[in-house]
Image (cartoon, rainbow, N blue to C red):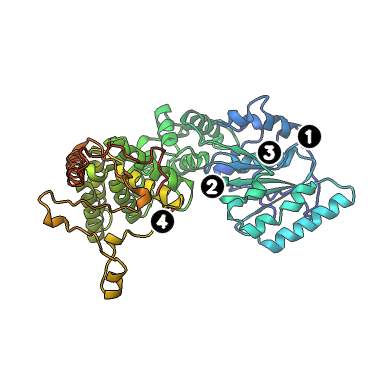
Amino acid sequence: MDLFDRSNADDDPARERGPSSSGNRTSRRPAAGTPLAERMRPRTLDELLGQDEILGPGSPLRAAIESDQVASLILWGPPGSGKTTLARLVADLTRARFVSFSAVLSGIREIKDLMSAAERLVAGGGAGTLLFIDEIHRFNRAQQDAFLPHVEQGSIVIIGATTENPSFSVNAALLSRCAVHVLKALGEDDLVRILKRAIDDPRGLGVERLTIGEDDLRLIAARSGGDARRALNVLETVSRATAAGGDGRTIGREAIDRAVRRAALLYDREGEEHFNLISALHKSLRNSDADAAVYWLVRMLESGEDPLYVCRRMIRFASEDIGNADPGALRIALAAREAFEALGMPEGGLALVQAALYLAAAPKSNSVYEAYGRVVNDLRAGHTDPVPLALRNAPTGLMKDLGYGSGYRYAHDYDEGTADLDCLPERLKGRRYYLPRPVGHEKALADRLRLLAEARARLRGGGDAPAETGDAVITKPTEPPRSRE
């Protein structure tokens, strides 16, 4: 069950471990053949770079770790940011019984066994249990709920690690009992420092006398996506592929180019980054920033996103943010989907880029979106009155006798192309849902609708048309229902 697999630990999972004699330096010794990233795993809080915001001197989390007063917490961050390393450092500094296991490999039975052991330990006067759960987001609701009573009783303290937003992936009840600490992707400077340490440190590649230029180190860092593990793996790969000379190994740009040809793209088609990137695309299109829109679109495609999902979002955008300001935008978005279905990737990706550029450049109006929301507001307020008799169909004599269709006026019988006919329920007469904006094609629609409203007013003998806003709902409209794609 213990992921950290210490060579000096006995087989008893309840074995208590206290701080090592070297203060906050761990006593682990990686076995021969261990990957470079594991050999260079930080042994002290000071060696853990890039997380000064939560682990800098004087920070609450650092003080809690150094005083062995860690409460239940969630470590949320991208791969290679130091979540597991931080948990290992806590393991070396705590006096509590430390147990760790992976949500991928453990089930509800293992959880119950662990909880029972923790309760017996506390009941017998022993220390509490500090439980590290790697990839806690992979536990289902029932598994997460199993921890709750034991966290409340204090028999266990949880340290959960996740790459997923805990707001979505951790039960609200468990999340409310844990402090969330956000670890950031490492910056380029931090990654360069980590690489230099690996080159110089005997634990790493110090005995190999590597020579590598600063620009080349920065190339590795830039292509690692903020992931220290990936950067060290690349360094180890190019080191092994470079022949040793009389003065050690000199690593050239060509070897690095081969190893880092494709930058790491953080993505999860079902996780938070999926929604972050589609949000960035949508907002870039709305802001008419064509370059940003193409960047986010291509990044999603290159990360493995379903292109048809992107098509659906652009079709939605064409109605939500462009609407009748440019009715051709919807046709362009639909054509892009059709082109992609015919071509597939990678050729079909160009059709999506073409559509995105058009959508970004098109005039914008959210009047269609707001019209939908205004109607939703009225429906939720109970404005669901019967259809006016004049608008009802009357296929039978009984219906005609009941007044169905009475008072209906056929618009084509009028030179104006509209009739003196109220098409909304009585309580909603004069309500304006669609308020077109004076932009693009919608300006012409606005003028046309205004002329028609004036014509109806003349036919009624009422003089001028209703005011521009009429009885329209002025408050921010309710967003039309959407799925969280």
Circles 4 and 1, Cβ within 8 Å, touching? The answer is no
Q: Residue furthest bottom?
A: 397
Residue type, label 3: Leu
Residue marked by disc 1: 21
Circle 4 — which element?
loop
Circles 2 and 1, Cβ within 8 Å, touching? The answer is no
Front disc: 4 or 2:
4
Identify the mark at residue 384; answer none if there is no mark.
Answer: 4
Residue marked by disc 2: 164
Front disc: 4 or 3:
4
The residue positioned 43% from the left and 27% from the top of the image is 214
Badge 1 density bin: few <14, some 14–19, many ≥20, Cα 10 Å: few
Badge 3 density bin: few <14, some 14–19, many ≥20, Cα 10 Å: many
Instruction: Judge by depth and name the residue closer to the eye, 247 or 55.
Output: 55
Residue marked by disc 3: 89
Q: Earlier in the sequence, mark 3 or mark 2?
A: 3
The residue positioned 69% from the left and 42% from the top of the image is 28
